[in-house]
Image (cartoon, helix red, strand yellow):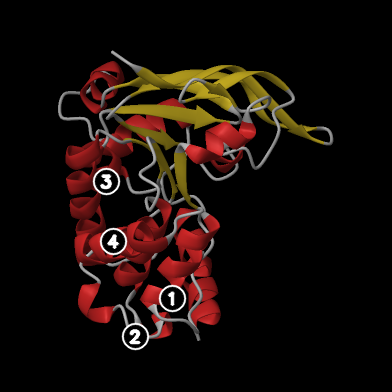
Amino acid sequence: MEVIVEVEQLKKSFGKHTAVKGVSFNIAAGEVFGLLGPNGAGKTTIVRMLTTLLLPDSGRATVCGYDVRRQAARVRQCIGYVPQALSVDGALTGYENMMIFAKLLGLKGRERERRIADLLHFMQLEDAAGRLVRTYSGGMVRRLEIGQAVLHYPRVLFLDEPTVGLDPVARRGVWEILAKLRRASRMAILLTTHYMEEADTVCNRIGILNRGEMVVTGTPEELKALVGNPGASMDDVFTYFTGNFLDAGGDFRGIRQVRHISRRLG
C-alpha cells in the first residue's frame, strides 16, 4: 500500500485556543478518506495545513512524500483543492474560469487547450462552457471547481464540504464524476462533510474529530461495529463518538454557505 498523505502529531493553535491537538492519520493512493466532526472540531484547519495554507505549530505532515512545512511548493504541485468558499468567478464563462486556472498552473499552448477541453467534457460542462457561471446551477458550479482543481492531474484532491447546499440529485452527480476521476487516475481524496450517508457511501475510511482530537479511524463498517448496536448508521456513529447530534449547527452553516454562493454569483 502506497501512503500518499501521512500526518503525525499535527498541532495548531490560534492564540490560546488549540484547534488541532496532535492528530495522526494516513491516506493511501486511490483512497477516499472522510474527515468528520462537529463544527469547530478542526477539520478545515487540518485541510488548510495539508494544502500549505497554514503552517503547523508542531508535528509532521507529508503529501506525496513532501513535507508541508519545508517543501510547500512541491506539495502544491501534486495537490488539488476545492475550498468551502466559492472559487470561481460568476462574471466569467466556464471556459474563461478554466483558462485562468490553467495559466496559473503554468499550462501552455495546445496542452492547455487539450486539458481544458477534456475536463469540460469529463465534467459534463462542454455545452455550458460559453455561458456565464452566474447562470450555472449549484451542481454545475461544483463540477467546474473540481475541473479547475484537477487540471494539472494532481495525486491528491482535497474537498472541504464539496456538496454543501446542493440538492440530492446534484450531490449524486458530483460523486459520480469523482468516482470516474478516481478510476481513471488512482487519485486520493480527502473530504470533509456533514452528510453522513455521503461519508458512508463514498469513503473507504473515515476519521472522526472532536474538539481538535482524532477520536477514531476505520472503515464505515468498522466504525458501526464499534457502536455495538446491530443496524447502526453513520449518524449513530457520529453521535456515539462526539456526543453531538449531526444537525447541531450543521444545517445553519449550510444555509449561510448557499447565501454566500448566491451573493458571489449574482
User: Which x, y percent locates residue 240?
Assistant: 39, 28
Residue under pointer 2: 131
Q: Nearer the observer, disc 2 or disc 1?
A: 1
Q: Earlier in the sequence, mark 2 or mark 3?
A: 2
Mark 1 vs 4: CB contact within 8 A: no
Residue under pointer 1: 96
Q: Residue at x 43, y 37 (%)?
A: 36
Q: Earlier in the sequence, mark 2 or mark 1?
A: 1
- Give me the disc on residue 198: 3
Q: Earlier in the sequence, mark 2 or mark 4?
A: 4
Q: Element at badge 2?
A: loop
Which residue type does callout 3 highlight?
A: Glu
Residue under pointer 4: 114
Q: Residue at x 46, y 19 (%)?
A: 25
Q: Element at badge 3?
A: helix
Whether residue 118 is situated above or below residue 220 in the rendered picture = below
Which residue type does callout 4 highlight?
A: Arg
User: Which x, y percent locates residue 15?
Assistant: 84, 36
Mark 2 vs 3: CB contact within 8 A: no
Q: Nearer the viewer, residue 172 or 242?
A: 172
Q: Is residue 119 visible?
A: yes
